[in-house]
Amino acid sequence: MVGAGAGIAGDGLFLTALAWSVLQVTGSPPQLSLVLGTLTVVPLVAAPLAGQLVDRRRAPDWLAGSELTAAVVLLAAAAWLSRYQPGLPFFLAVALAVPLFASLSGTGLAVMLARLSAPGTVAGTMARYQVASRAGRVAGPLLGGALVAVGDLRLCCLVDALSYVVSGGAWLLARRSLLAAAGPRQQSVRRGFTAGARYVAADRALRELVAGALLANASISAVNVTLPLLAAGPLHAGSGTYGLLQSAFQVGMLLAATVLSLRPLPDRLLGDRRALGTALAGLGASFGLLAASRVVPMAVAATLLAGIALSVTSLISDTRLVTEVPAALQGRVLGLVAGLAGALRPAGTLAGGVVAGLLGAAVATGAGALGLAGLGCWYVLRAPGRVAPEAAGP
């Protein structure tokens, strides 16, 4: 968990420092978009391939090696910066190389934590992982902003490299336990390159879970793009309110994850589709309250509630993915889901921006809220079903 928190904090630090440095050096919004777009696209492309490596028995070695390689890349970048002035080619190179190696842990962490968890404790483990993740997401950008203010990008690269060394060291410390939990060598990953996709396609319940996660991801992205528009428009506030809304969302997720790490959800709720549907409907209702808000306190409260609902939704879906999918296929399934979910984020963001431009930010937020609430109601009302997934074996 410490290694996970360090790695995620390093990701946030790197994103903040790199974005600010690009803007300071180039002064070009298009070049900034190009660099940030590279940071976004690389993990999406790498996620399905990372899933193939996570399903190998020697996955801990790959995970440790990828984190330490990312640290080496950052140390090389810091050395280069000590002699040369950065430009767009440099920024693109680090935006490509660092997330390429660091993306393996994003897919592998949930799988490895599930392997190390005793039966009946996976939900609590996933909640503790969310606590570490949210704490890292809050601390990383704050640390990145402070470091780039007192130093420069080179200092940020050195600190980020240290975070990856900590993460890689954590994988090495857990290596023996993970290898023991993996059991005998699995079947050829090469022959089963598409096994994750075939397994999802053959399992109705899992197929619906994945489809719901993808649609929810797009709806959330559509709402996120409206936050600054809501702050400047219906709320008649400024950038401070926008930051407050973002912080409230993260605080809500962190609070819910902390409570659920101390009192995990019982298995009967994790396996009940109505629980997931209720959480999604609650998320939609929270965003609906945000759309209707005309004063800042009401908007902050709505965003806080949305963070709590999203944390519960993520916990249920992540836990089901690592408990209902066979261990030999977990990496490939999670890699596929991560890639598809990320691919829908730009579409949701674009749709939210277009609707906000045409009909206003409140309408765009309300549309996303209706989509989430409708999806949640569909989960609650639709009869459960499952077909035998063995036909898509590894």
Image (spheres, rainbow, N blue to C red):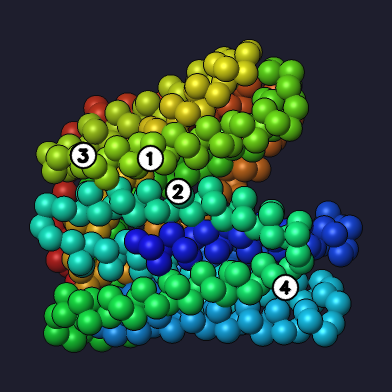
Q: Mark 2 points at which residue?
A: 134
Residue name at image x 49 percent, y 60 percent = 8
Residue name at image x 38 percent, y 48 percent = 131
Kind of residue sitting beneath label 2: Arg
- Which numbered marker is on residue 181? none
Q: Name the residue under label 3.
A: 263
Q: Which of marks 2 and 1 is in front?
A: 2
Dots 3, 1 in contact, CB < 8 A? no
Q: In this view, does 179 lie above or below 339?
A: below
- Which numbered marker is on residue 154? 4
| Alpha carbons under labels 2 and 3: distance apart | 18 Å
Kind of residue sitting beneath label 4: Arg
Quadrant where the N terminus is found in the figure? bottom left
Dots 2, 3 in contact, CB < 8 A? no
| Upstream in sequence: badge 2 or badge 3 | 2
| Upstream in sequence: badge 4 or badge 1 | 4
Kind of residue sitting beneath label 3: Arg
Q: Is residue 219 above or below residue 57?
A: above
Q: In this view, does 374 lie above or below 137?
A: above
Viewer can see residue 375: no
